[in-house]
C-alpha cells in the first residue's frame, strides 16, 4: 500500500454499525470488484468495491465478506475470505495478504482463503432466514452493465429462491454519509495533498504551457505525497474549455489573458478530495474576470455558511440557485424583469449556472447519500458554484470540501488560496 496503515478500529466500528441495522437471523454478503478487461490481456486499473473497503479495509481483488450476527457458530459471525498466494501469483503479481495480515487490516479474526468461499457459503446461508446483498444504488449512476455484484446477486436469488432478500445499499448510504473521526482524518490528508498540488501549480502556470503539462505536475505532487493517484480524471481547462463542465481532454496550450479552471483532487487510502480553483494564466485577472470570480466567491461563501445539520441537499441546491440569480443580475447577464416572469421550472440562471452546488464526498467522489433527507453532523459535502459565459470565454468555478458539524460548518480546504489577491500574489512571487 502506498498509504499509511489505517487503524482497524474504523472497520470494526463500521461493521458493528451495519450489523445493528440487519434484521434478526440474517446474513450479509459483500464481494470485491472484478478486474475489467481493457484489451487483449490487459486490464483497466482496479479499484476496490467501496462498500467492501468501508467494512474491511482490504484493498485487493477476489475478496468476500460475510456478516452473520446471529450465527449459531461464533466463528461465522464475521468471516473474511481473501486470495491465496500461489507460485504463479507470486511470480507475476507478488504476494497477496496473508490471513494474518488480512486479520490485522480488518480486525476480523476468522479469515479464510477465497477459494474455499463457494463451498462454505451454502452451509452458512441454510442457517439464515434473510440475505442482504449489495449493488450500486447511487442515483447519479447511469451504468447499465452487469457488475460482479449484480451477477453474484442474480446467482444467489436463483440458487436460494425461498430465502428473503434485502438490499444493503440503503443501510450503507446512511452509514457512509456520516463520517467517523477516522474517515475525517483520511479526508483531511487527501485535502492536504491536493493543496500541495495546487500551490505547486501556482508557480508553474504561465502562458505557453500545455494543459497536459499541468496535469503531469499534479500527478507528480500527488504520487510523491503517497496518494494513490487522482480522485478522478482532472479537469485542466483553459480559455473557452472552462465552460465545458466535464472537460478532460487537457490538450490545449494556455494563452495570455485566458483563465484556467482546475478541478482536481487527490485520492488517499481510497478517500477523495475535490477542489476547484480558477486562476489567470498570466498571473493577473482582468477587471471583468475578477468581477465574475468575486461574484462566484460570494455565492460560495454564502452557500458554505448554510451547510449545517438538518440541511436537505435537494432544497439547498435550489436555494443557492436563487442566490446566484441575484449575482447574475448584478453582472448584467440576467434582466430583473425577465427573472420575475420566468418559468420556475426552467429558471434563467441555469444558462450560466447549469449544475448543482453540492454533492456527497467520501470513498467515492460522488459519494452515496440521500439528497432528500436531513443531513446529520459528520456528512461531508462539496460546495462548488460556478458561472460560465461562453460568449466571453469565461468559465469560473470555486469548490471546497465542507464537514457538517453540530455548529458552524468546517471547511476542510480553508488553507487553500481562494481570494483573487492571494492567488495573484503567489503566482507572481519569485519564491
Image (tube, rainbow, N blue to C red):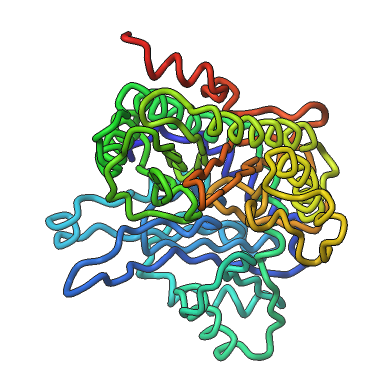
Placement of 277 over or under 357, stated as above or below: above
333 lies left or right of 207: right
The quadrant of the picture occupied by the N terminus is top left
128 or 278: nearer the viewer: 278
In percent of width and height, residue 49 lies at 48, 59
25 or 355: nearer the viewer: 355
In percent of width and height, residue 351 lies at 64, 57
Q: Residue furthest top?
A: 431
- Res 191 visible: yes
In percent of width and height, residue 138 lies at 61, 64
351 lies left or right of 192: right
User: Could you tell me how many numbered marks the image carries?
Assistant: 0
Placement of 370 over or under 382, stated as above or below: below
The structure residue drawn at horizontal position 38% and vertical position 29%, both measured from the top left corner, is 197
- Res 110 visible: no
The structure residue drawn at horizontal position 19% and vertical position 55%, both measured from the top left corner, is 93
The structure residue drawn at horizontal position 45% and vertical position 31%, both measured from the top left corner, is 279
Q: Quadrant of residue 256?
A: top left
The quadrant of the picture occupied by the C terminus is top left
254 or 334: nearer the viewer: 334
Q: Residue furthest left?
A: 91
Placement of 305 over or under 28, stated as above or below: above
In percent of width and height, residue 418 lies at 55, 25
342 lies left or right of 8: right
The structure residue drawn at horizontal position 47% and vertical position 63%, both measured from the top left corner, is 64
Amino acid at each position: 500500500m502506498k498509504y499509511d496503515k489505517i487503524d482497524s478500529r474504523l472497520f470494526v466500528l463500521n461493521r458493528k454499525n451495519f450489523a445493528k441495522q440487519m434484521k434478526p437471523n440474517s446474513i450479509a454478503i459483500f464481494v470485491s470488484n472484478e478486474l475489467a478487461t481493457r484489451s487483449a490481456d490487459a486490464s483497466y486499473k482496479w479499484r476496490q468495491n467501496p462498500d467492501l473497503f468501508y467494512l474491511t479495509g482490504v484493498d485487493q481483488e477476489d475478496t468476500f465478506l460475510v456478516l452473520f450476527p446471529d450465527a449459531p457458530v461464533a466463528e461465522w459471525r464475521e468471516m473474511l475470505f481473501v486470495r491465496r498466494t500461489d507460485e504463479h501469483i507470486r511470480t507475476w503479481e507478488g504476494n497477496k495478504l496473508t490471513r494474518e495480515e488480512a486479520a490485522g487490516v480488518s480486525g476480523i479474526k476468522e479469515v479464510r482463503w477465497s477459494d474455499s468461499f463457494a463451498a462454505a457459503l451454502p452451509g452458512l446461508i441454510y442457517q439464515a432466514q434473510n440475505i442482504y446483498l449489495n449493488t450500486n444504488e447511487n442515483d447519479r449512476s447511469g451504468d447499465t452493465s452487469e457488475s460482479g455484484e449484480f451477477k453474484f446477486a442474480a446467482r444467489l436469488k436463483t440458487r436460494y429462491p425461498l430465502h428473503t432478500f434485502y438490499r444493503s445499499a440503503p443501510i450503507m448510504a446512511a452509514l457512509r454519509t456520516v463520517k467517523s473521526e477516522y474517515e475525517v482524518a483520511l479526508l483531511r490528508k487527501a485535502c492536504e495533498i491536493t493543496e500541495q498540488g495546487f500551490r505547486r501549480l501556482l508557480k508553474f502556470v504561465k502562458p505557453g504551457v500545455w494543459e497536459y503539462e499541468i496535469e503531469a505536475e499534479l500527478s507528480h505532487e500527488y504520487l510523491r505525497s503517497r496518494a494513490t493517484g487522482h480522485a478522478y480524471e482532472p479537469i485542466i481547462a483553459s480559455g473557452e474549455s472552462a465552460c465545458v463542465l466535464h472537460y478532460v481532454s487537457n490538450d490545449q496550450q494556455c494563452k495570455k489573458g485566458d483563465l484556467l479552471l482546475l478541478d482536481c483532487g487527490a485520492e488517499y487510502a481510497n478517500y477523495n478530495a475535490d477542489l476547484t480553483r480558477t486562476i489567470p494564466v498570466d498571473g493577473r485577472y482582468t477587471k471583468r474576470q475578477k468581477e465574475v470570480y468575486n461574484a462566484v466567491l460570494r455565492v460560495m461563501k454564502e452557500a458554505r455558511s448554510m451547510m449545517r445539520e438538518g440541511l436537505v441537499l435537494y432544497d439547498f441546491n435550489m436555494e443557492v440557485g436563487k442566490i446566484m440569480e441575484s449575482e447574475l443580475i448584478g453582472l448584467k447577464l440576467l434582466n430583473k424583469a425577465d427573472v420575475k416572469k420566468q418559468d420556475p421550472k426552467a429558471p434563467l440562471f441555469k444558462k450560466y449556472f447549469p449544475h448543482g452546488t453540492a454533492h456527497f464526498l467520501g470513498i467515492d467522489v460522488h459519494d452515496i447519500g440521500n439528497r432528500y433527507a436531513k443531513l446529520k453532523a459528520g456528512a461531508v459535502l462539496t460546495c462548488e458554484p460556478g458561472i460560465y459565459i461562453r460568449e466571453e470565454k469565461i468559465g469560473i468555478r470555486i469548490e471546497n470540501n465542507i464537514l457538517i458539524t453540530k455548529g458552524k460548518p468546517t471547511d476542510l480546504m480553508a488553507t487553500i488560496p481562494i481570494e483573487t489577491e492571494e492567488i495573484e500574489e503567489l503566482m507572481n512571487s519569485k519564491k
